[in-house]
Image: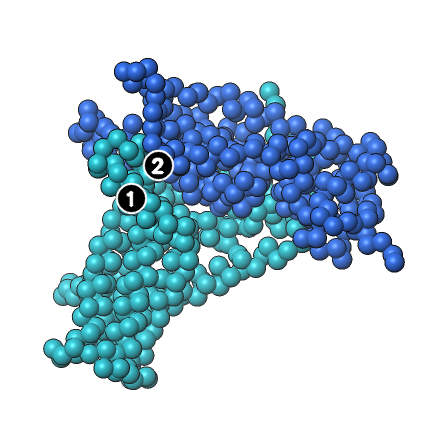
């Protein structure tokens, strides 16, 4: 039986490569990007204050649940859902397996020698298979955040536009693009079919699948833009609520 | 006027080991790495072994690692490489080296034999099979594969972890082309999970990055197969749905 080559032929070990480009740059940027978002969002979620200003509600705290029996930040009641969606997302999996687990750190670059590897077949990574359930929850969040964006245009019952209204609208838009470009959604909406032409339902599914496929090609882009908008929306509302900056009213 | 040259550092050896040897090659317009290797064979050392055939990026024979990146030698132009340092040319490191730049890729053929072949459904009343263009488009992409095995070479599950039970990206593409075929009735999903170990893929997308035919291996083949495996084995709602509507299943 033919075999693969043993690892002893060429030099191996973490970071070993003949590549001459800056292969390390991408994992470093991912560690910086995801790391700084992780630190800020954890801090912001634990604060439990300054999450609303006028008609604006921070996306970290929406939907807002206030219960007498819950003594911690209300963000902790809801943030597990979008966190789960991103943690099991097919794009982020690539990003953190490379950047945080160095498995592999980059293409054709050596890994830690002789470490156990079971991919996504064993706990905890076998849980990546429940991504579609987090997608269902994330889709509900899009409707809630879209309503928040609509509410952000009504100041004491009067229509108006503030910078915060635009920030929350952009946030809902980009989170929507990220959520509905999801690989699981692409499968569920039509990708599961083998035949797209045998009935009218199949033809409709083909059209939606084609649209989702176009969005899906930019899934990484939507993932990063929406990560920035959701973080920025919280920062903006927090700074307004703390009185550090003033919301500029356009109308 | 002095002739422009490049330094090429080539792996010379076999499965027992080897060393790198440096050669100077003259540059000419439109030159590719395979031209440089041919120049070394013709002028410096005719024992240098390289596998090649079409020199047009279609036979998939001349896969190697150029400056550490898995690429076809015939499709890598010299003017796209930095010439201030020697250009490293090595065989694909995942497979045993036979000699110099030639390696034994026969492990791939063993995997291929395990894939249940195309099994068409019953023909129409006129004895033919027909399907629409939109049904063909998706699997058409997978037919572009030239079996250069660069994706297998770069896949860290095979390259670093030596998981010989894993089918690898090339054969997950082939499995996807069969599973998504509108006329195929064979069910390979259990095999994809249990025998070809799709779960070992952690979708780090290097296969897609190196594919010379630009097949979107991860997004269009592997992830859709993973989702089909989820529907069959990890999603109780989909299972319930499939049981409820099994008789009216239109996915085939």
Tell me which residue sits at (28%, 49%) in the image. A135
Q: Is residue B159 left or right of residue B62?
A: left
Question: Residue B114: image x %, image y %?
Answer: 48, 21
Q: Nearer the viewer, residue B128 or A67?
A: B128
Question: Residue A78: image x %, image y %?
Answer: 24, 59
Rendered image quadrant of residue A86: bottom left
Around disc 1, counting alpha carbons within 10 Å, would you say few (fewer than 14), some (14 to 19), or many (20 or more)?
Answer: some
Quadrant containing the C terminus of chain B is: top left
From the image, tell me which residue sits under label 1. A207
Tell me which residue sits at (23%, 82%) in the image. A251
Tag on residue B239? none
Question: Which chain did the image draw in cyan?
Answer: A
Separation (CA) of disc 1 from disc 2: 10 Å
| Vertical position of residue A76 compared to residue B148: above or below | below
Rendered image quadrant of residue A171: bottom left
Question: Residue A186: image x %, image y %?
Answer: 32, 44
| Vertical position of residue B27 compared to residue A147: above or below | above
The numbered mark 2 sits on a residue in which chain? B
Q: Nearer the viewer, residue A39 or B66?
A: B66
Question: Residue A153: image x %, image y %?
Answer: 20, 74
Q: Is residue B246 left or right of residue B10?
A: left
From the image, tell me which residue sits under label 2. B134
Question: Which chain did the image draw in blue?
Answer: B
User: Furthest residue to the front?
Assistant: B126
């Amino acid at each position: 039986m033919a075999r693969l080559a043993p690892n002893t032929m060429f030099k191996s070990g973490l970071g070993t490569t003949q590549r001459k480009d800056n292969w390390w740059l991408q994992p470093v940027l991912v560690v910086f990007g995801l790391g700084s978002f992780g630190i800020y969002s954890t801090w912001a979620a634990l604060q439990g204050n300054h999450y609303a200003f006028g008609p604006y509600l921070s996306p970290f705290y929406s939907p807002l649940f206030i219960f007498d029996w819950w003594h911690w930040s209300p963000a902790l009641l809801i943030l597990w859902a979008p966190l789960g969606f991103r943690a099991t997302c097919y794009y982020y999996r690539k990003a953190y397996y490379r950047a945080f687990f160095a498995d592999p750190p980059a293409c054709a670059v050596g890994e830690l020698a002789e470490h156990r590897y079971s991919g996504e077949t064993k706990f905890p990574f076998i849980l990546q298979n429940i991504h579609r359930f987090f997608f269902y929850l994330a889709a509900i969040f899009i409707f809630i955040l879209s309503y928040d964006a609509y509410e952000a245009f009504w100041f004491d019952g009067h229509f108006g536009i503030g910078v915060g209204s635009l920030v929350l609208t952009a946030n809902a838009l980009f989170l929507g693009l990220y959520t509905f470009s999801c690989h699981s959604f692409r499968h569920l909406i039509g990708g599961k079919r083998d035949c797209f032409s045998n009935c009218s339902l199949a033809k409709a599914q083909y059209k939606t699948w084609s649209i989702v496929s176009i969005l899906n090609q930019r899934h990484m882009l939507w993932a990063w833009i929406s990560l920035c908008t959701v973080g920025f929306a919280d920062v903006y509302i927090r700074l307004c609520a703390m009185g550090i900056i003033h919301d500029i009213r356009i109308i | 006027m002095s002739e422009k040259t490049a330094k090429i550092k080539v792996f010379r050896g076999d499965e027992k080991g080897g060393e790198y040897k440096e050669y100077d090659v003259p540059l000419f317009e439109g030159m590719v790495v395979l031209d440089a290797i041919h120049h070394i064979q013709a002028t410096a050392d005719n024992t240098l072994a390289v596998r090649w055939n079409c020199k047009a990026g279609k036979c998939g024979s001349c896969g190697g690692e150029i400056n550490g990146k898995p690429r076809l030698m015939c499709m890598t132009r010299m003017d796209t490489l930095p010439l201030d340092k020697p250009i490293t040319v090595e065989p694909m490191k995942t497979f045993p080296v036979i000699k110099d730049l030639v390696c034994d890729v026969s492990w791939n053929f063993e995997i291929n034999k395990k894939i249940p072949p195309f099994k068409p459904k019953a023909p129409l009343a006129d004895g033919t099979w027909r399907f629409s263009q939109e049904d063909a488009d998706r699997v058409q992409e997978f037919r572009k594969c030239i079996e250069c095995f660069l994706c297998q070479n770069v896949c860290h599950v095979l390259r670093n972890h030596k998981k010989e039970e894993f089918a690898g990206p090339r054969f997950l593409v082939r499995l996807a082309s069969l599973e998504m075929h509108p006329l195929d009735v064979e069910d390979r999903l259990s095999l994809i999970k249990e025998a070809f170990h799709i779960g070992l893929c952690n979708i780090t997308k290097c296969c897609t990055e190196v594919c010379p035919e630009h097949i979107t291996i991860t997004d269009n083949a592997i992830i859709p197969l993973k989702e089909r495996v989820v529907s069959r084995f990890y999603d109780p709602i989909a299972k319930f749905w499939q049981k409820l509507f099994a008789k009216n299943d239109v996915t085939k």
